[in-house]
Image (tube, rainbow, N blue to C red):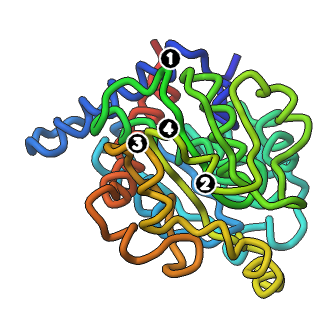
């Protein structure tokens, strides 16, 4: 059976923890200058329906480091943009490449694609989940503070794909997640029910950050929601991560942001550029965590 990675729930807890260990090892290998090419002659197909900086560069670089190749496919370059059924595209592409990464809007489309692919499919972001980012985030926490099990993470902002992936991460990595979100912007109700033993909803940041070991946020208006920007700015006005908010968390709490950030909206410049911020390590770790994932999915044991 083909192993896909559409959400964090596709892998067991032990494998997810092993991925973090392996990502750190691969980071050390790359920094040492050692040539390590376990995916020589392997090809990753990269389907992009949404714009990307970190996702494209990290996957493409990762395949180059591993001795493989990555093909960038946008709707302009493929039959996707001309209405070819998802099932047909999956069947054809999976006969030509060794793994397929998809960054798109509709999560159900990704699930359909995976059902008809005979090679691993990786979710590089949908409107519902962003699991690759969480691998990088968990690696970053481990590097700075050790095991996240039993810790408290506070997510401040929209109940979006990042929030959903943090909810899954809470149950897979064993931490408590406090979500500070204004009414009307809650995460998915069914997912909230599934993760209720790990996730708490708050309507203000002050209560949500008390005792937090890590604070994270995301933009108020995600891709495709730009027309809601003005409305969301009002709704989220009291949900900015600033120095006052960070001061309410544990003294050694760290700050993360998946980027790109809108400074002085969801986060103040003083926080994102401050001493508690680890966002640049977090961004770099997309490369290393995804290399560990590619190795796991593409090398037959």
Q: Are marks 4 and 3 in contact (CB under 8 Å)?
A: yes
The residue at which mark 4 appears reads as 211
Q: Do the residues labelled 1 and 3 touch (CB within 8 Å)?
A: no
The residue at which mark 1 appears reads as 15
Residue 288 shown left or right of residue 173 in the figure:
left
What's the distance in space between the residues labelled 2 and 1, CA to CA? 35 Å
Image location of residue 268, percent across then percent down = 46, 75
Front residue of 277/201: it is: 201
Q: Which of marks 2 and 1 is nearer the N terminus?
A: 1
Residue 250: assigned label: 3
Residue 206: assigned label: 2
Q: Are marks 2 and 1 in contact (CB under 8 Å)?
A: no
What's the distance in space between the residues labelled 3 and 2, CA to CA? 12 Å
Q: Which of marks 2 and 4 is nearer the N terminus?
A: 2
Residue 181: assigned label: none
Q: Earlier in the sequence, mark 4 or mark 3?
A: 4
């Amino acid at each position: 059976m083909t192993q896909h990675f559409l959400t964090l729930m596709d892998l067991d807890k032990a494998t997810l923890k092993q991925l973090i260990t392996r990502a750190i090892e691969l980071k050390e290998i790359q920094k040492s200058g050692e040539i390590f090419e376990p995916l020589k002659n392997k090809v990753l197909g990269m389907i992009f329906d949404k714009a990307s900086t970190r996702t494209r560069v990290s996957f493409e670089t990762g395949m180059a480091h591993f001795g493989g190749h990555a093909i960038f496919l946008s709707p302009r370059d493929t039959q996707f943009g001309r209405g070819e059924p998802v099932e047909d595209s999956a069947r054809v592409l999976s006969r030509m490449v060794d793994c397929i990464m998809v960054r798109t809007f509709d999560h159900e489309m990704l699930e359909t694609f995976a059902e008809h692919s005979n090679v691993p499919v990786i979710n590089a972001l949908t409107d519902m989940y962003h699991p690759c980012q969480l691998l990088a985030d968990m690696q970053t926490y481990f590097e700075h503070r050790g095991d996240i099990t039993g810790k408290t993470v506070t997510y401040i902002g929209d109940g979006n794909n990042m929030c959903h992936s943090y909810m899954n991460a809470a149950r897979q990595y064993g931490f408590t997640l406090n979500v500070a979100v204004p009414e009307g912007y809650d995460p998915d109700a069914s997912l909230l029910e599934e993760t209720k033993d790990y996730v708490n909803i708050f309507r203000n940041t002050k209560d949500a950050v008390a005792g937090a070991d890590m604070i994270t946020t995301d933009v108020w208006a995600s891709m495709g929601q730009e027309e809601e920007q003005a409305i969301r700015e009002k709704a989220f006005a009291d949900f900015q991560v600033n120095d006052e908010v960070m001061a309410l968390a544990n003294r050694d709490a760290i700050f993360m942001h998946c980027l790109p950030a809108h400074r002085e909206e969801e986060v103040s410049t003083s926080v994102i550029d401050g001493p508690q911020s680890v966002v640049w390590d977090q961004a770099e770790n997309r490369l290393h965590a995804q290399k560990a994932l590619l190795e796991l999915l593409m090398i037959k044991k």
